[in-house]
């Protein structure tokens, strides 16, 4: 928990994007096809996982009654076809009363006009007027197995969400080594922009050839000091 908090603080303080986080962990962690519904938001936090299934949002209402504040809620769906998992009422409940930092929906949402008006930090697969049924459904072994696998990955991990999408840092990567990777990717970005904006290098010289590693004296002292931690003279 201490390391997770440290990583979250580092990402928040330096505004490390979902793109940079994916790069830091060797192009991994991106949730496929998830897009920002309202633009301009940047949120990072620990993930709380819930899942609804079989074209019903009854299980969702059951699961969102009790969890800690300041999390990013990952709302999964299984066999919900092309039905929206929830809309404005659930969104308002989650943001206003349950105090979530953001919501990621592995599915569709509805009431798009209201959710856009309230400018909720929300990421999803898309929108539709067609909603899930509000009926009690029985969980099957297949669904239990799916939830178990998904929850093992998402629950307690870190999510970084912005206009580019959502990237997950799994729990097992929330280590000192993982923190160092994030710090390095942020430093590399600073160096690349310095080479581009100040030295007027082209992107091939900067990104592909990394000529700054062959002649570190061209970098400002503070960047030289930082890069020496990661590279050999």
Image: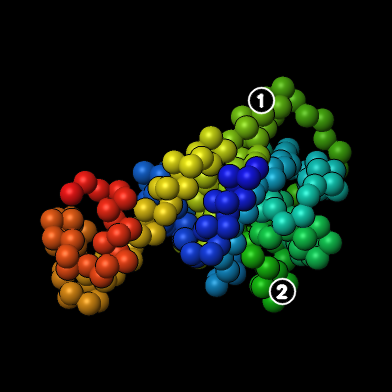
- The residue sitting at 66% across, 53% down in the picture is 72
Is 78 situated above or below 85? above
Dot 1, how many residues are within 10 Å of its Cα: few (below 14), some (14-19), or many (20+)?
few
Residue 20: x and y, percent? 41, 56
- The residue sitting at 40% across, 48% down in the picture is 181
Is 189 situated above or below 105? below
Considering every residue shown, the one lying at the far top of the view is 141
Q: Quadrant of the N terminus?
A: top right
- Which disc is residue 145 wearing? 1
Q: Is residue 157 visible?
A: yes
The residues bearing labels 2 and 1 have C-alpha atoms spaced at a distance of: 36 Å
Residue 142: x and y, percent? 67, 25
Which of the pair 176/8 is nearer the observer? 176
Residue 146: x and y, percent? 64, 30
Is 22 situated above or below 190? above
- Along the horizontal axis of the image, is 32 left or right of 187? right
């Amino acid at each position: 928990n201490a390391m997770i908090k440290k990583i979250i603080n580092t990402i928040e303080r330096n505004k490390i994007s979902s793109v940079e986080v994916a790069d830091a962990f060797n192009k991994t962690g991106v949730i496929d096809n998830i897009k920002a519904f309202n633009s301009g938001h940047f949120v990072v936090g620990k993930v709380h996982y819930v899942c609804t299934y079989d074209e019903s949002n009854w299980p969702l209402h059951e699961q969102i009654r009790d969890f800690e504040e300041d999390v990013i809620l990952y709302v999964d769906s299984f066999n919900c076809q092309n039905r929206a998992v929830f809309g404005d009422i659930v969104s308002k409940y989650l943001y206003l009363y349950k105090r979530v930092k953001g919501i990621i929906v592995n599915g569709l949402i509805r009431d798009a006009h209201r959710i856009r008006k309230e400018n909720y930090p929300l990421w999803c697969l898309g929108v539709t007027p067609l909603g899930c049924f509000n009926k009690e459904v029985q969980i099957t072994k297949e669904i239990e197995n799916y939830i178990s696998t998904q929850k093992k990955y998402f629950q307690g991990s870190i999510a970084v969400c912005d206009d580019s999408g959502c990237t997950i840092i799994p729990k097992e990567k929330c280590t000192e080594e993982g923190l160092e990777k994030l710090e390095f990717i942020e430093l590399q970005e600073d160096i690349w922009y310095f080479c581009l904006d100040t030295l007027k290098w082209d992107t091939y010289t900067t990104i592909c050839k990394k000529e700054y590693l062959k002649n570190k004296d061209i970098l400002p002292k503070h960047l030289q000091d930082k890069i020496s931690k990661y590279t050999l003279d």
